[in-house]
Image (tube, rainbow, N blue to C red):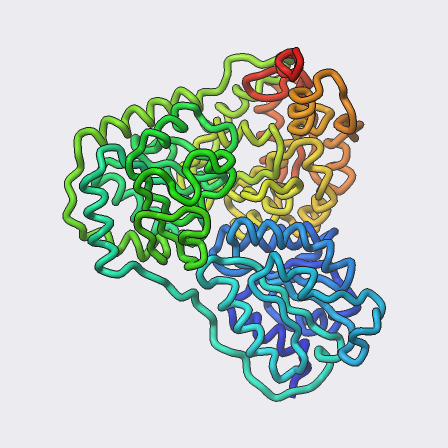
Amino acid sequence: MKTGGQLVVEALEAQGVRRVFGVPGESYLAVLDALHDSPIEMVVCRHEGGAAMMAEAQAKLTGRPGVCLVTRGPGATNAASGIHVAQQDETPLIVLVGQIERGMRGRDAFQEVDYGKLFGGMCKWVAEIDSADRVPEMISRAFHTAMAGRPGPVVLALPEDTLTEMADTAAAPRAEPVDSAPTQAQVASFGALLSKAERPLLVVGGSRWTAESVAALQLFAERLTLPVAVTFRRQMLFDHCHPLYAGDVGLGINPKLTALLKDSDLLILLGDRFSEVPSQGYGLLGIPDPDRAVVHIHPGAEEIGRVYRPTLGMVATPAAFLEAVAGLSLTAKSSWAARAEAAHAAYQAWSTPPDAIPGDVQMGRIMAWLDERLERDAIFTNGAGNYATWIHRFHRFRQFGTQAAPVCGSMGYGLPAAIAAKLQHRTRDVLCFAGDGCFQMTGLEFGTAVQEGAAVIVLVVDNGMYGTIRMHQEREYPGRVSGTGLQNPDFAAFARAYGGHGETVETTDQFAPAFERARASGLPAILHIKLDPEALTPTRTLSEIRAAGKGK
């Protein structure tokens, strides 16, 4: 006989879970007690939002569900930010929530929440385990559900008395995602569409990728000399130095890539939904008729035809699709290679950092130095803000498993993601880029990094404002600054106060030696980069944006 708490931990072990992230709560003490005797590592976080983001980031980098443990009521609501990331980013996530005792339901008991109503709109499944003997069944289903089709978050509530109840039952076997694949007829139709196309473009994204399927993607593109673009914050899916890489279809898109998309006569959307950001506000394709030939391949059947009616839709994972089309007898056209060459040249010009921006810190030189200095397997994480453009536009990702960034645009994501990445890959460099506003959303998780010995290097790009909002504000209401200024601490001193390494960078020349000292310290580190407020974006100053604002 085992307690429900022991059965929960035993079930997680059976699923191959090595690490869980959470904030302790009295509602799931029995689980915490069972973890005491388990090889599973409990990463103690400072806030449930940070814990959920860490679990989501680990899932991004491994393909297996990340697991987050939070307590009832405020603990669960705090975790909502990370759950939303998992939903929009199509990431498998399991959130285990402590819950009130079963006999107290419906009385508005202490910290009582109806989790079905709270999370039902952003989770694939929300349920409560109402008896200890159902723990193996429910956790097995949670893992299957989180990974199946379009991956996403699952929330399981654990009533306190369920966790202390005794039962004699065994854990279920390890869950594996079920692949979906195109039919032979669909493969033949795809071959016919591609053979007729003069200006095809392959756009890849989504979450059901592995190192092997990324390699298969490159082989497929090389065989047909197809230009390949990636969707927003999915840049690790194709080597940026490869001659077929056309750039990322995200915020601040290269106008020449926009033109390439509009000019294509066959758009192959592989793995992603082509939602608001990559579609440039749903403006690149007609809805529901895309106005051109579109092949949409996605593992979730509900996504095919949801917004765009494709010429050909296939419910398939990227790996299954690429395996199915590998044997197609197709001949590349010379026009395809010419378009790919021109697209890559346009990307190279677009991704060359600017020579100068206002102030004594030149982020372009810093980005160039990092690309020269770091190994190809270095992992970059970030949250949201104008500062992220320095990574997305000017860093050249070279391989799979090197990026953790929120497609949903959540601030505060970079530091928790970096901690999860470093715990997963201790020997690799892990860099977190964060704006001053972004960092302060989850900055207390730096204490988690110190406690866990996760030697991340955080680059806090400080311009004293919520820069993205200020940019929009100056464009819409020039000169009327309201609600976007920030009075910031000494972030380097903040790092040292936690027992980490901290330095301030006020000139470009100070960065390289500061970075090397941070790296050599073996400690979690913050480099506080003082950016001139005029350098609002890599290519436009605050004054220029204000002058171009409405009514000017």
The quarter of the image holding the N terminus is: bottom right
Residue 212 visible? The answer is no
**Residue 413: image location, x then y, percent:** 63, 43
Residue plotted at (33% across, 37% down) = 228
Residue 405: percent from the left, percent from the top? 55, 42
Q: Residue at x 63, y 16 (%)?
A: 545
- Vertical comparison of 319 with 534: above or below: below
Q: Measured along the vertical axis of the image, is residue 213 above or below residue 492?
A: below
For residue 520, side relative to residue 173 (left or right):
right
Quarter of the image for residue 75 reads bottom right
Q: Which residue is at a point 19% across and 40% down the rendered structure image?
A: 196
Quadrant the C terminus occupies: top right
Q: Is residue 244 left or right of residue 151?
A: left
Instruction: Count the marks.
Output: 0
Nearest to the observer: residue 220 or residue 3: 220
Question: Quadrant of the rendered structure where residue 257 is?
Answer: top left
Q: Quadrant of residue 465?
A: top right
List x then y, in percent, for residue 550: 65, 17
Q: Is residue 169 above or below residue 467?
A: below
Residue 23 in view here: yes
Residue sitting at x 64%, y 16%: 549
Percent of width and height locating residue 293: 30, 41
Q: Could you say which is closer to the camera, residue 78 or residue 507?
A: 78
